[in-house]
């Protein structure tokens, strides 16, 4: 993923690429400017010497032209300017920027120029053409057939990139000289790349669209395998495919880099794009229109580029070249280009034969070094509307044959749809050699320590996470913690983890020891996982604090707002069996024994007698069912990080508490249900919605009720109530709605001064209904219950949600320095409760595109 300056290339023709694919071609892109004003020049003719191949620049001065290999010069001409002859190199893809000198006649120092015509959709033949493309989309799309089968070849790679002199003297290359042989200087003009990752997949695919069913049979799979101590290999491939998603130009919205871009042939596209007819060309005896398009607002999630549109009455896309505009509100991307090729089949319709995405990633748009990424998909051996036996679709949607991962070089040489470069061939061996080098291992250890928090101290053990080694709390005071865990090298099936902590104020030791035995034959993280987990923990906890992807004793979370004296000492031991299935259904079954003792401002006392209670013990069995259709994720060192998509996630959990079983004090039952869904709204961004509800059956003291998720840290927590105090609300029944919308800069992109900041806007609303039955409400007479906590003056600080729902909302600005988000949160109800903050500022850190 990452490199060189965001070029403003807007393709003006792809004649040669599509009309003469049998011959080797060079693709030349660039920008033509006025040498004096530096402004882009429109309608500059760019041609080869005999004028047989030519194109013109668009309104941004950008052009693209494909010429036969061996072409050495291009002519640039425009009325009123001196002709310029540009020299070409030998690279297959080159960029050439040209500045033309003005020959404009001066009359009394007034420059005579044609006035620029205002763009309009009305009576615009280019817009009329695109509307015909839109009207005919359904009959031209991939799913317009009844049945399809085809062979697909996929190649994914990413490489370090820079100027050759810098890449060849890079620290990584200096420490590992053999890598210098892998540097490729032919792929990108003016740059060199060093491939680090490569993946190839050859598969047979079967698809029927009524009903919609699909099957992929992988018959060849070859990829670089990275060290499991540092990388999740399956997750890395999934993540790369997630950011380089398959593109269907006929979809209204195209997902790239976790964002949605509006297709240039979407139903609403004429509202967001400008279109220009460049010329009419003939491809294989078929007449085509070369149509260019550019965003009306260059900061929005839109493309620039060219379409070839057939004039045979179908108005189908025959080819496309497009790119993300350099001003688009996207992080870390300097350039991203998309090209697709289509061929006419026996039914006279155009069907895709090749799709390619290339991206140049870097820390900034101007940084020289970075990472170059590429995903290529090619399609052959189409069989259209031929019967497909029902047995083909039985079983999993994707099946890998036994021989797929062991195919020899001969197989790949004979079956690859296109040849790969020598440096790409070497990457398989070179990276394996690199991973065995001491300097690389040292570097990866440092990166893992910085970003994941763990340091490998031997082949079998790593120490961490470092951000938990020091923290402080009102109960423990200064707290030191030290821990570690085993690596897959210790044992792929057995995973051990432990830590010990000491509080200098309460002078008590805390510790955790746990182990997992994998029953799947792989390490415990490999999907689909199956295993047994056993652990024991003796530590402190804030009731109601539930953090997402963050350790609770993180140093930064030691800082809390308001009164933070509600703590518990916990002794927990747990045994759990878990299993995941390929269809992303999973379940857990377990037993948990939990002893809770008051700490800080919490002391347990009988509601009727007010006698002190040293602690309570719950003994419970539980089961959890989860279904996340089409879920994708990257497995980190501590958590699985989901890669969001449009599909919902369902979670259902049931618990049974047992009195007198292994010292359990109470009988009760609990059930909770949670539904999460992301809604994509095209140019308006996306919305995340969470619905959750729960019910507790039985008579239980308040520590065993639902303690609603609160947050008194200054970190914005997505699934907690950010202005609710710890242990402020409890209940035996509840229903909640959490809504957050991300505008992705849609509003700020329209404001001249703000659009350059690339800030993004957020709004959220959270509402919680709840209740507490009389049998679970302390009233001074309930012998089986405990009194709610109080403050120093004896006033209650814990309540039930009876009269109205708890509500809060926020507005936020994100993408500050590409990482930070700041929210202003406002609480709307229960403002008279003690120690309540009506509003507050919260912060969040996130890496995103």
Image: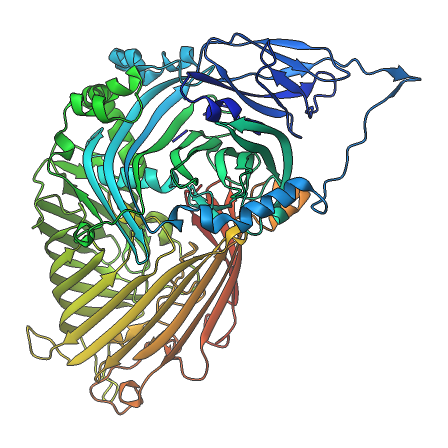
Q: Nearer the viewer, residue 195 or 768?
A: 195
Residue at 40% of width from left, 41% of height from top? 347
Q: In the image, 680: left or right of 727?
A: right
Position of the N terminus, as image quadrant, is: top left
Q: In the image, 110: left or right of 456?
A: right
Residue 617, compared with residue 119, is above or below; it is below
Q: In the image, 163: left or right of 103?
A: left
Residue at 52% of width from left, 49% of height from top? 136
Farthest-out residue, right? 108
Q: Is residue 600 visible?
A: yes
Residue at 57% of width from left, 29% of height from top? 10
Residue 294 picture location, percent across and down? 60, 37
Position of the C terminus, as image quadrant, is: top left
The answer to which image quadrant residue 212 occupies is: bottom left
Q: Nearer the viewer, residue 335 or 566?
A: 335
* Colour convention of the picture: rainbow
Residue 589 picture location, percent across and down? 13, 64
Residue 819, compared with residue 670, is above or below; it is above
Q: Nearer the viewer, residue 164 or 378?
A: 378
Q: Is residue 325 visible?
A: no
Residue 29 picture location, percent across and down? 54, 21
């Amino acid at each position: 993923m990452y490199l060189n300056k965001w070029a403003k290339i807007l393709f003006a023709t792809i004649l040669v690429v599509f009309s003469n694919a049998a011959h080797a071609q060079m693709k030349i892109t660039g920008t033509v400017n006025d040498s004096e004003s530096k402004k882009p020049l429109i309608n500059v003719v760019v041609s080869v010497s005999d004028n047989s191949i030519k194109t013109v620049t668009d309104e941004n001065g950008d052009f693209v032209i494909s010429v036969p290999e061996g072409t050495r010069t291009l002519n640039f001409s425009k009325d009123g300017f001196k002709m310029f002859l540009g020299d070409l190199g030998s690279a297959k893809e080159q960029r050439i920027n040209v500045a033309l000198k003005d020959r404009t006649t001066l009359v009394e120092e007034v420059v005579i120029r044609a006035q620029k015509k205002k763009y309009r959709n009305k009576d615009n033949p280019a817009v009329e053409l695109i509307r015909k493309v839109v009207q005919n989309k359904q009959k031209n799309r991939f799913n317009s057939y009844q049945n399809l089968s085809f062979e697909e070849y996929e190649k994914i790679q990413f490489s370090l990139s820079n100027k050759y002199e810098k890449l060849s003297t890079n620290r990584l290359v200096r420490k590992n000289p053999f890598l210098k042989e892998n540097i490729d200087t032919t792929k990108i003009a003016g740059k060199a790349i060093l491939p680090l990752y490569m993946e190839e997949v050859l598969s047979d695919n079967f698809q029927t669209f009524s009903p919609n069913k699909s099957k992929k049979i992988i018959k060849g799979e070859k990829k670089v395998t990275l060290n499991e101590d540092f990388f999740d290999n399956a997750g890395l491939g999934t993540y790369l495919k997630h950011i380089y998603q398959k593109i269907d130009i006929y979809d209204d919205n195209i997902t790239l880099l976790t964002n949605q871009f509006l297709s240039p042939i979407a139903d609403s596209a004429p509202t967001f794009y400008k279109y220009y007819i460049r010329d009419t060309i003939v491809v294989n005896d078929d007449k085509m229109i070369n149509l260019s398009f550019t965003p009306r607002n260059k900061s929005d999630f839109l493309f620039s580029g060219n379409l070839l549109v057939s004039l045979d009455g179908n108005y189908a896309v025959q080819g496309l070249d497009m790119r993300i505009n350099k001003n688009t509100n996207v992080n870390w991307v300097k350039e991203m280009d998309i090209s697709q090729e289509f061929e006419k089949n026996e039914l006279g319709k155009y069907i895709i034969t090749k799709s390619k995405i290339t991206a140049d990633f870097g820390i900034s748009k101007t940084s020289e070094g970075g990472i170059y990424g590429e995903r290529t998909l090619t399609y052959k051996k189409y069989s259209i509307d031929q019967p497909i036996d029902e047995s083909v679709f039985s079983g999993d949607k994707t099946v890998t044959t036994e021989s797929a991962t062991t195919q020899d070089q001969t197989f790949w040489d004979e079956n690859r749809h296109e040849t790969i470069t020598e440096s790409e061939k070497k990457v398989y061996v070179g990276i394996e050699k690199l991973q065995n080098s001491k300097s690389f291992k040292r570097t990866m250890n440092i990166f893992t320590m910085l970003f994941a928090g763990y340091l490998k101290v031997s082949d079998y053990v790593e120490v961490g996470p470092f951000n938990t080694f020091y923290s402080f709390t009102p109960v423990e005071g200064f707290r030191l913690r030290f821990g570690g865990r085993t690596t897959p090298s210790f044992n792929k099936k057995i995973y051990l983890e432990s830590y010990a902590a000491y509080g200098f104020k309460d002078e008590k030791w805390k510790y955790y020891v746990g182990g997992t035995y994998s029953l799947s034959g792989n390490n415990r993280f490999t999907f689909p996982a199956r295993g047994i987990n056993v652990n024991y923990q003796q530590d402190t906890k804030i009731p109601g604090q539930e953090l997402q992807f963050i350790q609770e004793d993180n140093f930064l979370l030691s800082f809390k707002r308001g009164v933070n004296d509600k703590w518990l000492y916990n002794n927990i031991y747990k045994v759990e069996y878990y299993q995941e299935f390929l269809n992303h259904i999973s379940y857990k079954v377990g037993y948990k024994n939990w002893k809770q003792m008051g700490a800080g401002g919490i002391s347990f006392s009988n509601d009727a007698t007010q006698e002190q209670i040293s602690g309570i013990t719950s003994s419970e069995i539980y089961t959890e069912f989860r279904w996340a259709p089409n879920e994708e994720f990257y497995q980190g060192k501590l958590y699985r990080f989901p890669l969001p998509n449009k599909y919902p996630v369902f979670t259902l959990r049931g618990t049974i508490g047992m009195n007198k079983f292994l010292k359990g004090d109470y009988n009760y039952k609990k059930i909770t249900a949670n539904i999460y869904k992301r809604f994509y709204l095209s140019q308006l961004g996306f919305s995340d919605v969470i619905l959750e509800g729960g019910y507790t059956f039985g008579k239980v003291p308040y520590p065993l009720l639902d303690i609603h998720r609160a947050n008194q840290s200054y970190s914005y927590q997505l699934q907690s109530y950010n202005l609710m105090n710890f242990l402020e609300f409890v209940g035996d029944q509840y229903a909640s709605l959490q809504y957050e919308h991300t505008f992705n800069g849609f509003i700020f992109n329209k404001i001249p001064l703000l659009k350059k900041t690339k800030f993004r806007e957020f709004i959220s609303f959270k509402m919680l209904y709840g209740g507490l039955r009389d049998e679970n409400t302390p009233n001074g007479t309930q012998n089986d219950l405990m009194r709610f906590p109080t403050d120093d003056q004896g006033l209650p600080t814990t309540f039930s949600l009876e009269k109205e729902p708890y509500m809060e909302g926020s507005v936020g600005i994100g993408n500050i320095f590409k990482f930070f988000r700041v929210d202003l949160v406002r609480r709307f109800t229960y403002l008279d409760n003690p120690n309540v903050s009506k509003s507050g500022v919260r912060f969040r850190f996130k890496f995103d595109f």
